[in-house]
Image (cartoon, rainbow, N blue to C red):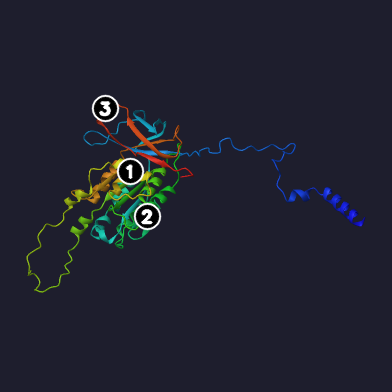
Amino acid sequence: MARIAGSLITLLLLLALPGVFAWGQSPSGPLPPKPGVEVQLPPKDTEAKVKVHVALVNTPVTVRDGRGDMVHNLEARDFQITDNGVAQQITHFDLGGDPICMVILIETSSRIAPLLPEARKTGILFTEPVMGPTGEAAVVGFNDSVDKLQDFTTNSDLIENTIAHLGEGTSGSKLYDAMAVAVEMLSGRPQATADKPGRRRVLMILSEATDAGSEAKLGEVLRQAQLANVTIYSVGLSTTRAELQAKPKDTRPRITPPGTFPLPPQPGTPQTPTSEDNRYGNIDLMAAAVWAVQHIQDKVKDHALEVAAAATGGAHLPTFKDRSIEKAIDEIGGELHSQYTISYTPTGSDAGGYHEIKVNVLRHDAKKLKVRARPGYYLATPES
């Protein structure tokens, strides 16, 4: 009897504690909602795409006639701009008047050491024809390292003094890393809006078109430059020209008195500046620029400065032949203060990926005009 009574007491205790059974097993179906509590339903489209937006797209537009002269008499109604084929409304239009925010990026590698004396004299050209009285600028030098030599300032004397005292560095040339630093600096300046266009962001490069040892990739830098509305201009330095301007270094052992030569000269002719024409072939720069932005993991082996300029609506001016560094900078300054600035807030096309920009002139003589603008920009979605 005692055993039966104990079993009954145990059974009654278990029936009084239903949670004991629930603790060791999962419910066989969904739990019913509690009275008064709204049931949270799963999203209808669990694979909804993430939309991305760009606040403002700014594109410089250079228009030249058949003789190559700048055209200055166009108005906003004379332009049509599309983003991925969708016509856009121009929210800001200006001809050469918006102030400039510029990073002056100068190679200080020992490879171009013979050209540094000429480069040190360019400070006043950067501050007057390019930066202008209302602009601001910073100076960055690079070789094996990237050095911020002067932060943004409106003081022309500081810019000119910094450039006048450029030091010769090592033989390296981390061009892409330096460009990445410059674009980041410009991106940190006050952001333009449709109501306040602000300053035009310009990256001015004085360098040879060679990169050695950079961690950054050109396509990646150009993506950021496009999104930050940075226009890249470059003055291409010539290593061959530097070698020709350098003082000769004769390290041959002397077996005869100075001024005498025991053997006839070697056959062949020395390299001249005109031989550098081989570096600038007939390539489609716009196609190369779009490819570089879309394929950031792949390397652009040639024409890096030209591609960078084409990708952002700028220009590349090499300094071989009869164009000096001073003349190239002066030409760029003239263009900056004679070009149109067109801004729009993208509508009707907010998908990720590459966005193609097309700018057309609608005037009756449009076929005689040559229009240059940035080809587009790349929008990366959170998944990409």
The spot of residue 192 in percent (x, y) is 44, 41
Q: Say if residue 378 shows up in the picture.
A: yes
Tell me: 7 left or right of 296.
Answer: right
The spot of residue 88 in percent (x, y) is 41, 31
**Quarter of the image where one finds residue 264:** bottom left
Question: What residue would you read off at disc 3?
Answer: 365
Question: What residue would you read off at disc 2?
Answer: 177
Q: Secondary structure at mark 3?
A: loop
**Quarter of the image where one finds residue 287:** top left
The spot of residue 190 in percent (x, y) is 45, 45
Residue contact between numbered discs 1 and 3, judged by CB atoms under 8 Å: no
Separation (CA) of disc 3 from disc 2: 43 Å
Tell me: 173 left or right of 354.
Answer: left
Q: Secondary structure at mark 1?
A: helix
Question: What residue would you read off at disc 1?
Answer: 289
Q: Who's the residue at 23% across and 43% down the image?
A: 282
Q: Nearer the viewer, residue 291 or 347?
A: 291
Q: Nearer the viewer, residue 354 or 254?
A: 354
User: What's the amino acid at mark 1?
Assistant: Ala
First reached walking from the N terminus: tag 3 or tag 2: 2
